[in-house]
Image (tube, grey):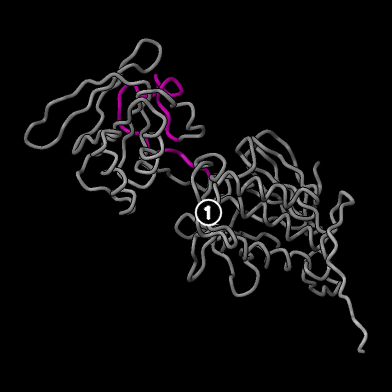
Amino acid sequence: MIKTDILIIGAGPTGLFAVFEAGLLQLRCHLIDALPQPGGQLAEIYPKKPIYDIPGFPEVLAGELVDNLMEQIRPFQPGFTLGERAETIEPQEDGTFIVTTSEGTRHKAPVVAIAGGLGSFEPRKPLLDNLETYEGKGVAYMIRNPEEYAGKKVVIAGGGDSALDWSIYLAEIAESVILVHRRNEFRGALDSVEKVQQLKRKGQIQLVTPAEVVSLSGNGRLEALGIRMAGEDPRELHLETDAFIPLFGLSPKLGPIAEWGLEIEKNAIRVDNTLDYQTNIPGIYAIGDVNTYPGKLKLILCGFHEATLMCQSAYQRIYPERRYVMKYTTVGGIHGFDGSKREAPKAVVKPID
């Protein structure tokens, strides 16, 4: 049995920052995540994509932000149960909770903070007869390491931001990039659409619209695919390729958390945002993209704010007899569980002449 003060379900940016805020209160944290590494979507889906709305960072790569968060929480020595999904939760008579994972690992804590982002994700797949045959053998639904496509012939399908952004990125390293979309118009940011058009004019990207991929072929791994043109001339093109990346978005699901008796609204957990982001079950909180309340914005910086208030409330729940006086880190410094200290500079008082 793993015991901790705050059990955090989800090791994305909001869950990681909650460790820091809890550490300032001298509360220990343990995190559960179904992914094999911390970072959530930032690490799993788009580690190389830049983020522009993190305070103090005009631009930061998603993977770099995860690295910075991990360094920030290092003094507070959080525990991790990775590659396992939180399956069940059992309230105990003493007010604590026992959470058991898909692998049978049991965790006990007086506070549970659900920071699962948008839940678990399943890619929206095109309807192709032999698609699964080539999964991991030329077909991928997300790009974890762009360098894998260096010097290769790549076909991307989709019309949103991900399809546009990755077409732009891979155009610099791949042998060729073909972007297929069933419409002539794209749904992504206008700036990205213009960049794709510029790369098309330079011959670095080939646009095939309106069209869709209708067949895959290869001996052991993907070697070619068929593209059917729409409109008045419904001919079919057959192209050699090394990789097919359909980027039709991800379908989020709460998974087993939806069966925990929490109030659910539109696939998100309803919380009280007037105080501490607690759910309808006392002691269980939901922070970040997984929650909903009037005026909710699904932004990383909003998750940071929610994590901060959640930790303050968790402290009072764990230590109801104590009166906590907040101290700014510029005054109190940071004292890690590993014995490290980052002391705030002492004020120097000069005598009056």
Residue 351 position, x and y percent, is 93, 85
* Location of the C terminus (image quadrant): bottom right
For residue 18, above or below residue 144: below
Q: What residue do we see at 53% from left, 58% from top?
A: 58
Disc 1 marks a residue whose amino acid type is: Glu
Q: Mainly helix, strand or loop, the magenta region?
A: loop
Quarter of the image for residue 256 reads top right
For residue 153, above or below residue 336: above
Neighbour tally class for label 1: few under 14, some 14-19, many 20 plus, Cα within 10 Å: some
85 relative position to 136: left or right: right
Observer-nearest residue: 307 or 49?
49
- Indicate yes or no whether the magenta region holds residue 6: no
Residue 189 position, x and y percent, is 34, 53
Residue 247 position, x and y percent, is 37, 38
Tag 1 secondary structure: loop
Quarter of the image for residue 266 reads bottom left
263 relative position to 200: left or right: right
Considering every residue shown, the one lying at the far top of the view is: 219
Observer-nearest residue: 328 or 275?
328
90 relative position to 231: left or right: right
Considering every residue shown, the one lying at the far left of the view is: 232
Observer-nearest residue: 173 or 45?
173
Residue 32 position, x and y percent, is 68, 44
Q: What residue do we see at 61% from left, 39% from top?
A: 34
24 relative position to 87: left or right: right
Q: Which residues are magenta?
A: 120-142
Q: Which residue is the site of mark 1?
A: 59
* Location of the N terminus (image quadrant): top right
Q: How many marks?
A: 1
Q: What residue do we see at 37% from left, 47% from top?
A: 161
